[in-house]
Every structure is written in structure tokens, then in C-alpha cells.
Image (tube, coloured by chain):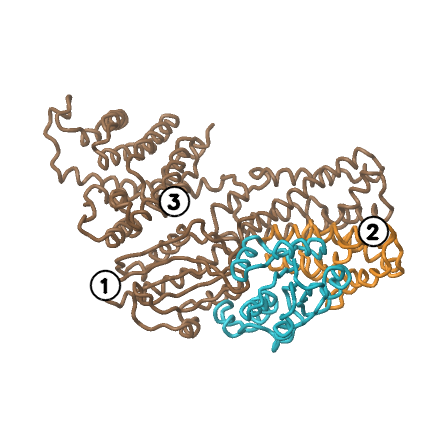
Chain colours: A cyan, B orange, C brown
Amino acid sequence: MYDAVVPRLLVIEDGNEYEEFATLFLADRFEVVAVHSAAEALEAAPGTDAMLIDLRFERARDEDLLGDAGEAAARLFAGDLERARRWLKEQQGTLILGALREAGHDQPAVFVHDFPPRRLANLARLYGRVGAVPTFDAAAIVRTLESLA
Amino acid sequence: MTRDEATRLAHDVGKYVARIARNAPAEGPFPAALVPMLVKDLYALPGGKRASERFVELAPDEVAMAPLHAALTEIDALEERVRAGDDEACRRACVRALEVEAALRAYAREAR
Amino acid sequence: MSSMRRHPLSLVLAFALAPLGLAACAGTEPVDGGLSGASQWAAARALWHIDRDPAAYRAWIEIDPATPEGREAHRLLAEAEPHYRRGIERVRGGDPEARESFERAVRIAPMDPVLYLPLARAFRDQGRADTDNPHLFIRAAEYYRKFIALVPHDPRTEEARAELAEIDPEGSRLFAPPGEVGEAASQPLPAPQEVATWPLWVAVAALALAVAAIGLLLWRSRERLESLDSLAERKPELHPAIHYLVSSLRHELLKHRIGAVGSAVDALREGRASEAQIEFLRGRLYGGEPLTDAWHGHLAAFRRALGPELDLHRADKHFRAGGRAIEAIAKLEKRLAAGDARAFEKLSTAHATLRELDKRLGQLAQRLVRTSVDGALFRDVVDAVRGEYAAGAVQLDEVVIRSPEPAPFVEVFRVDLVLVLKNVVRNAILAVASEEPPRRIGLDVDTHVELTGEETVRIHVRDTCPQELTTEDIYARRMSRGLGLVTAALSRYDGAIQVEPADGEWAKSVVVRFFRAYDEE
């Protein structure tokens, strides 16, 4: 599935729970590279083979968030800037994936989130090789990444 | 409960409470290396709160939540033994954590 | 006794009020075949949605189905027809709420006039079953006449005339064909203008019946028995109140006193209950306010808020079962204290019944807050606004309503969504009022995929008023034009409102947007 001797898994999250999990349960399959913002992800993405992405970045600083809170507030939340910022945090993982794809990084990506099927299909249409597993399930994550390879 | 609230509950409590529980080996002694992370999952979720505390903050006032509250109360009662790495306590806590995770996920799906 | 006989005038009222547009039917000309498809479709829609002219059916069906307008017209006719047929079946079955099916159908498209015959027969049969109620025959005669007038060449016209003659020998003579043997044939045929006047007196009669029947309905409604689901289905405006009452019942009684003792009930039945569990169970079930009082207190709250005629114990099987379970638990106190194993079983059964009630109420509460954004919703909104004095006085040349199949859902109480849209539609109508014709408004909906993979539902209210309007204007005007309520509702449901520029056919579009609720799982 991966060209590298030990494939590299880019873990993108706002805390360290994914990294801890990957280090414990995925380290026999991947070298884990953890980052905590879109900027770090764009920098680290070259040379990685797959991505494990957190959806909600509720602990991220406002200035590190991707997305225009003002535009979202006007278009989606009747001008409520605070609600728009919260939404950007809650959905940040998808926006980071969008930025990575725009920069040409098309590695298989997996979210640990129980998306409704229609939404997951939308993400796949937008961003290509995207999958999701509903829980922290190491075997399911590996299976999903392999199916997307 | 709105779709967003149910999703948040499934995420903040269900997803993290079962992080180790779902991946721990099914047989043999509970690995000591997993105990510190199991303790985090059950008693110090992201944000520092116990799973039961976060559950109380987010759970709706519904009958369906009562068994989950009971499961998390039992997990809290096991804390001392889980922290000590007691095999039986860790296994029991994992079983209850998986029940909570599955129920909250089902609940969030229904709320869509 | 059939429900029809219990409520003799309800069907009469239903049809006196149902906007089937009797009076205007005889003299309406078909739509000019020389019009373009779009104009023809606009005129046909106006004939129904603005004028409520039953001859609109012909105008709709004549639009070429090979054109987009024709496809839409034929699709809507096909969508409405099952509702009309269902309404006729409900009349035939004596359903006092048959009106609902017709109201729904009327909002979609006109009725095929051939259906007036089965409708007439349904009323005739009900009239025969309920001889104390002559109004049913009057209504039947009315629909026989409509059938004969609107589809005179149908092969069943002769049968219809004969059946009409049976129930209304006098009136049927007006509808006898030329050359018919018997009394009608021996007299000169009525002059065309005489034929054209019959709708007027029938309309007057219908109005008089409506007024009389309103009084009877008010009297009758005091006796109506209805389940909570049925009430919710029939009255979307009550959804927030029902949601609140259901949530209170679930929280205060079903969760804290019933759900909380679930583990203890299981332990008791399995013979493994601890002292602490038994004490907890005793406190929750038998401490404080008696369970039966608490239950009846909640039912009384439902009646206070939703109407004194709402007898959930009698009319709603789930509440009836819940009430019995509460009574059963209340009677078990002594036997439980005595350790009676059969009492444990009974407690477990009653507990399961209440859990089931809670589950059903949870599902109902969830349904109440989901609204389908479809053509029927738009037509309700337009009809409501057109019923207002100022907006109703505006001469509109066209109201264009488009909706996709399947319609998207949003997580908004229908009554709140209607409130939001009524405000926007009212402003659009009043805006075009001051402009030169053609004065047009349009409502349609589409969905948009966000970068997050979520979808938003965009409801467009379009108009032909060239006056500039910006999003900022909408927020600035909110206090003076009722938009304060709109912005409050938007904020509550994560919604937004924006003005989008012209797209050629329209001068502008006000877009109301909410996140889509997924409905496929």
C-alpha cells in the first residue's frame, strides 16, 4: 500500500489524544507524525503517506483556525460571530483537509467520527480519498486507510 | 436534544471513554502500559473532566440516559482499583465504557 | 354508530370551507393557447393558487408535458391526485377530518373534475346513512352538478344526471341534456345565462352552510377525541407547546421517577436487589407527590395548553397504557414491601410500558422539530400572506413555487419557519406592489454543500421589485417590519438571511438558510 519502508501517518489534532492512541495501537504499522494546526499540517504533509484527522479543534486558538469567521457569521449564523467561530472549531478538521488537498496533498485521510453517510459522501466528493471510522478502533482505521490506498 | 447536542455528547464522552477499551487485547492480563491511558479516558477526558462529569453536563433529561449514568457511576466506583491496574476492575470498566460509547453513538444517530 | 353519525356536520363544514372554488367554475375560459409555455404555466398557476378556479385543472393539464413547465404541472397534478382520492375515501368512510386530505391537495394542484363524481357519491352514501342530516345530500348534489358542468362529455354524465335526479329532482332539471325524454325534454332548455347563474346560488348556500357549521364545529370539537400524534399532525402551530409539554413529562416523571429506578427494578425481579436499591426505589416511586397525582398533573397541563377536549387517556393508546402502568405501580407499594415476587414481575412490566411511552414521546419530540421544506410549505406561506389585508390587496401577476424531490428537511419548528418565511414573503409582495406590472414573486429551495461536507438548505424568496435591498437593510429594518422575530428565530436555529443579486428573471432574491437535517438514515 505504501512506498516507504515504514509508512508515515500524519496525525492532525488539537490535543494529544490521537497521537497517544496512534503511538500505542498503530505504531507497528506507521511512523507517527503529530501536528496541531493547519499551518503545521501543511508543513509536515510532504513525505507522509496517510492522515488521521481530528474533526473538532475546540482547544485551538482563534488565530490558528482556518476559515473566515466573519463570512461564516454573515452567511450561516445571522451575523453571530461567536457562533461562527465555534462552528469553525467544531468542523476544523474538514477545513484543514481542504487546505491540504488544495496544496496538492492527496494522501488517504481518515476521521474518527460517526459521520452521516450523506455527509461522508459529500466529503469524498470534495476531497477524494476520505474515510471515517466511528470510534477509536485501530483495526478499523488500518482497514479504512488500506481501502483508500 | 438537538442533533448537535447529541453529536457533542457522543464525541466528548462516548468517543474518548472507549479509546483504550475498544483496543485493549481481549484476553490475558490487562496490559500495564495501557492503564495510564485508560485512567485518562475514564477520569481525565480532554479538558480534564471525568467522563461521568462531562456526561452530566451534556446528557439530556431522558430515561434512556439513566443506564448510562449508572454505568459511569460504576466506572467511578472502580477508580481506585483501575488506577492500581487491577485486572478485573480494568476489564469491567472497559466493558461499561464500551456500553456507554455504543449507546451514545446510537443516540446521536437517532437524533440526526 | 359511525364517526360520521357522531359528527353529522363536520363533513359539510369541511367542504364548505375547502377552497374547491365552486362559484367560478362555469364561466372560465381555457388558457389562451397562443401564450408561451412559461406564460401559460404562470397563468394556469395563478388561476389556481390565486383565483382558486377549479377550471384551472384544464389549464394545467393542457400545458405541453414535453416542456419544463408542462412537466412541472403534470408532476404537481400527479402529486395532488392521491390526496384528493384519499380525501374522497375518507368522506366515504365517514371520517370527520377528511378536510385534511383536501386541504393538503388543494395546496398542491387543482382536482381532476372527474373526481367530483366519486366525491358526490361518497356524500350521497353518507347522506343515506345519516338521514337526519340533509346537508350531506345538498353537498352531494353540488358535486354532481360540478361534475356534469365541468366534464359534460364524460360517459358517466348520464349516470350522474340520474343520480342527481334521485336526490334533487328539481335541481337536476337544470342539468338535463338537450332532447332528454320526460319533463325536462318537454320544456325549453334554460338560457345559457341561467345555467351560468347556478354557481352563484350554490356558492351562497355553501357560505351559509359554512357559517352554520362553524358554530356546530365549535360545539362538536369539545367532544373530539384525538391522539397526541394526530393533534401534532393536524396542528403544526402547536408543535412548540407539545414539545415543551412532552419534555416536561419525560424529564419530571418518566426520567426522575421511573427511568431512575430501572436498575433497581431489574435487580428486584432477578432477586439481587440491595437494601440501598430497594430504599432508592421506594423513595422514587412512593415518596413525595403520589405518582398518580403527578401523572394526572401532567395530563392536566396538556389539556390547559392544548384544549380541554384533549383526553389523552381515552384517545391515545400509548397514554392509556402509560396511565394504567402508573396506576399499577401505585397499587403495588404494600406488596413490594412484603417481598411479593409477583409484584416484582408486575412492576417490571409496568416499568417497561412507561419506558416504551418515553421512547415514543422522544421520537415524537424529534419529529416535531423537523420540517420538510417543500411546495406545500411554500403554498401555505403564500396563502397565509395573501389572506392578510395589505398583501392580499396587491395584484400579483404570478407566484412561482418550485421545490425539489425529495424535499430537504431542516431542524426548525414548522410554525417558526412559516413565521420567518411569511415575513420575507410579505415584504416581497408589498415591495412589488408599488411597481409596474408584471408583479411576480417566487419561492424555491436548493441545497448547498459546504466545505465541511455539511449541507445548507437555501430558501429563495424572489421578487421583481427593482428597488435595492441589502442584507444590512434587512437587519436595520427588523424592528419596523417584523423582522425582529425573524432574526430571533434564525439565531435560535443556526440560520441566516441574506440578499442575493438579480439573476435575470428576478430583480433580487432574499435567501433564508438553515443547515440540512439528514433524513436518509
The one nearer the camera, A11 or A149, is: A149
Q: CA distance from mark 1 to mark 2?
A: 76 Å
**Residue topped by disc 3:** C103
In the displayed structure, does residue C161 sit left or right of residue C481?
left
In the displayed structure, does residue B76 sit left or right of residue C137?
right
Asked whether residue B52 appears in the rendered view, the answer is: no
**Residue topped by disc 1:** C437
**Residue topped by disc 2:** B92
Q: Amino acid at mark 1?
A: Pro
Q: Amino acid at mark 2?
A: Arg
* Mark 3 neighbour class, 10 Å CA radius: few under 14, some 14 to 19, many 20 or more: many
Q: Secondary structure at mark 3?
A: helix
**Labels 1 and 2 in the same subunit:** no
In the displayed structure, does residue B62 sit left or right of residue C367?
right
Asked whether disc 3 touches disc 2, contact meaning CB atoms under 8 Å apart, the reply is no
Residue B33: x and y, percent? 84, 61
Q: Amino acid at mark 3?
A: Glu
**Labels 3 and 2 in the same subunit:** no
Mark 3 or 2, closer to the camera: 2
**What is the chain letter for disc 3?**
C
